[in-house]
Amino acid sequence: MRDAAPTTIYLKDYTPFGYVVDSVHLTFDLEPHSTRVTSRIAFAPNTETTDRSFFLHGEQLKLISAKIDGIAISPTVTEQGLSCDVPNAPFTWETVVEIDPANNTALEGLYMSNGMYCTQCEAEGFRKITFYPDRPDVMAVFTVRINGPHPVLLSNGNPVDAGPHWAEWHDPWPKPAYLFALVAGELLAHSSTFTTVSGKHVDLNLYVRPGDEGKCAFGMEALKKSMIWDEQVYGREYDLDVFNIVAVDDFNMGAMENKGLNVFNSSCVLASPETSTDDNFERIEAIIAHEYFHNWTGNRITCRDWFQLCLKEGLTVFRDSQFTSDLRSAPVKRIRDVIDLRGRQFAEDNGPLSHPVRPESFQEINNFYTATVYEKGAEVIGMLKRLVGDAAYCEAVDLYFARHDGQACTIEDWLKVFEDTTGRDLTQFKRWYSQAGTPRVNVTEDWTDGTYTLTFTQSTPATPGQPHKDPRVIPIAVGLLGSNGDEVRKTEMLELTEASQSFSFDGLSSRPTPSILREFSAPVILERDSTNAERAFLLAHDTDPFNRWEAGNALAKDARLNMIIKGAAPDADYLDALQKLVRDDDLDPGFRALVLQPPSASDLAQTLFENEHAPDPQAIYDASETMAQTLAQTLADSLPRLYAATTVEGPYQPDAVGASNRMLNFRMLALLSRLDGGDQAAQQFASADNMTLQYAALVCLLSIDKGAEQNQAFFYQWKDDRLVMDKWFAAQVAFATPEKTAAIAATLTQHPLFDMKNPNRFRAVMGALAMNHAGFHHISGDAYSLLADWLIKLDPLNPQTTARMCSAFQTWKRYDADRQALIKIQLDRIAATPDLSRDTTEMITRIRE
Ligand code: 0A1
Ligand code: ZN
């Protein structure tokens, strides 16, 4: 083991640290292989505890010297940190350590990316920078001096002073070490300013490598929109003189909310019409908002311990979804979020990695930056808001900010503000935080003497470590429709609290059609016998856009499942319903595009598994191909008209209306390609003046196993743009036919531009491999072994990215015995690798169980 033997940390064992930190002074003398970090920390006994043991985290640090109140000491140093005797009174702690950023391929702590220094401290990276109580409940005011030859030297807070080759920063807001950041390099600033609602002037800078200046404008505008939105919607104002963002090419995640100095994976901030797609623009806008919103939900109010991660992440994801809904189309955002939730979070929640939104134990916290903590965490906030209502939600959140500003909090603190403002008892609601697994909600209905009754029964399957589940409170939004499609009952929020419970609606003149779980009011699996006729009716008439889409999605899934299970032909009712919908020009094009978007292979696999059929990935692929071909033929007459109608004239703008049109335009092109062998797509590729159209054309061609020429042209056009090259690597694998997928991925790993040390490039190939469902699960097993080979190679260099990618195997028990055996061989092989990191060991152990 390279890491120390894994130990499990439990929420129930939380104790506060014995000392508080009054101030931290850090000096960095930057050298690629021997950076010196000098720390001066003012400690004082913490009056809230009597435990006076003194332990500072520290990993991979060379201790040069340590002093207490100016007197040299010799602390006991282990691989995890140091301990020593300290005075039972305030004292000054000083150390000098040496670190090696140039050899830091794990991208945690201080590391180098293309010659630039950069840090990543969440969750436990600060301990790789200096000895410190690296835990989020220790908050302190930091002053930082950076000595280095670079023109740009940045840290958190406000600039104090600078000279040639040095700069000093002071952050007046007490913060935990995970929010520390330092950046140094030859960077260019794209600058602007913002005036807050109370008239405070803020300098805004987006720092990038030379050559990327042209990709900053959109991110800067997104930042300003976020600042205004948080003032207007949450009453939150920015609190420093500067807000800096830095784009870095080597980064394990999307971005990081360091106080006043957000660090972004360059793929999540750099954008231009020529190199970014509509989806990229929307995602960038959302991530900039997310990181900015953390300034209040995460930074001003932080987490007491890492078990509370969802306190900041669930809330901040919820806030960024609200932001995107407000700026763009709310129904389209909701539908896309649910597709994503079902694809990633449901897969996690219904497999071996299932864990509560607030986990109760972990070995490596980096393995818990999951869809459950983030996306289900956001759904839980959404449910809370639905249950208490919009006004009460605002009141409770205001109290949260007022009561807890400057504190490190827990989920209990969060729920208490809702209890105090609404008088509600949220004891049962708290189960959403403590119980893992996706609840199944079964619905039956009755119509007797003018009374319509819905009976709901909830149950949650056992998950690892949680055999028994208690009923949760589930908000179920229900509306009732009359036979002509009119709403006979407006949306009502039913509160399911029992294992089984009925709700009646009387005074109805005829049996209504129910629209249940409107807006996807709770993250559950709804089980209800329905007919295609009813679904087609809801697809045509439901007044709730989410459920309208959901009806189409249910039809789409059913049609494909019947093809897979029963060998049925593509369903005529479904094709008919789609034809009507596509021609309805009153409907938002983006919405129509989403109804036309085929259900994902992974979603179909999960549904087959739930219905006791081992999913055959090749059969799923074949059915989806046949359906696409039939759909293209059925819609043949409408395709050219709609393709033309959704072609946006004029210079490209990444606005919501244009993007919505291009979404449908892309669907039309994908179907047309199945009829014309890709002629239209080839034309579009040749004439495209923006990446959305160029990439869409390439994807359409690759999806029908064509486009070799365009693929090559794309390469030569973009080989010097690393973010576009990531698209090039990914598209070839993601859209390859099943039998070619592994071979294409293997070939690409030999390409001179493949670089395993760059997480974006590694994910472009290996992430796409895992996402190509039929390709990844091809019965040859080639993709399984290829992924395992590369995970084994990457682990010693970058455990975090390796561990995250292990989740590609999390659904393995869904599949047939042959595939399970093939995957098991790979899991065993990874597990048996000598010196496997703690991160990967934990993931593989949990997946194998
Ligand atoms: N807090 C960031 C996500 C993040 C988490 C961990 C990281 O390194 C291990 C980096 C970023 C966010 O939610 O945006
Ligand atoms: Zn976040």
Image (tube, grey):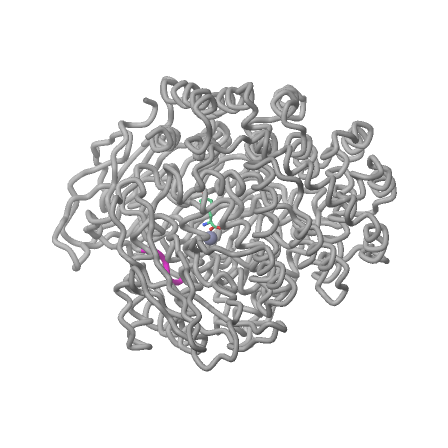
On the rendered image, what quadrant is the C terminus found in? top left
Q: Magenta span: helix, strand or loop, mainly?
A: loop
Q: Residue at x 43, y 77 (%)?
A: 449
**Which quadrant of the figure has residue 544?**
bottom right
Q: Is residue 216 left or right of residue 249?
A: right
The residue under the point 15% across, 41% down is 85
Q: How many marks?
A: 0
Which residue ends up furthest to the front in the rendered image?
449
| Image spot of residue 609 (x, y percent) | 45, 38
Front residue (pair 610, 750): 610
Where residue 722 appears, as percent x and y from the top left, is 68, 36
Q: Does the magenta portion include 301? A: yes
Q: Position of residue 483 (x, y in %)?
A: 60, 72
* Among the 4 quarters of the image, the one containing residue 618: top right
Q: On the rendered structure, is 471 left or right of 768? A: left
**Residue found 74% across the figure and 39% down from its top:** 629
Q: Nearer the viewer, residue 542 or 125?
A: 542
Q: Nearer the viewer, residue 262 or 11?
A: 11
Answer left or right for 259 relative to 501: right
**Is residue 754 something that shows in the picture?**
yes
Residue in view at x 31 percent, y 61 percent: 500
Point out the image quarter for the N terminus. top left
Relative vertical location of residue 391 with respect to residue 582 in this rendering, above or below = below
The reply to whether the magenta stretch includes residue 128 is no
- Magenta residues (range): 299-303
* Residue 722 horizontal side relative to residue 429, left or right: right
Where 812 falls versus 610 (above or below)? above
The quadrant holding residue 641 is bottom right
Q: Is residue 171 visible to us here?
A: no
Residue 558, horizontal then vertical, whole percent: 57, 47
Front-lying residue, 573 or 282: 573
Farthest residue in the bottom direction?
Answer: 507
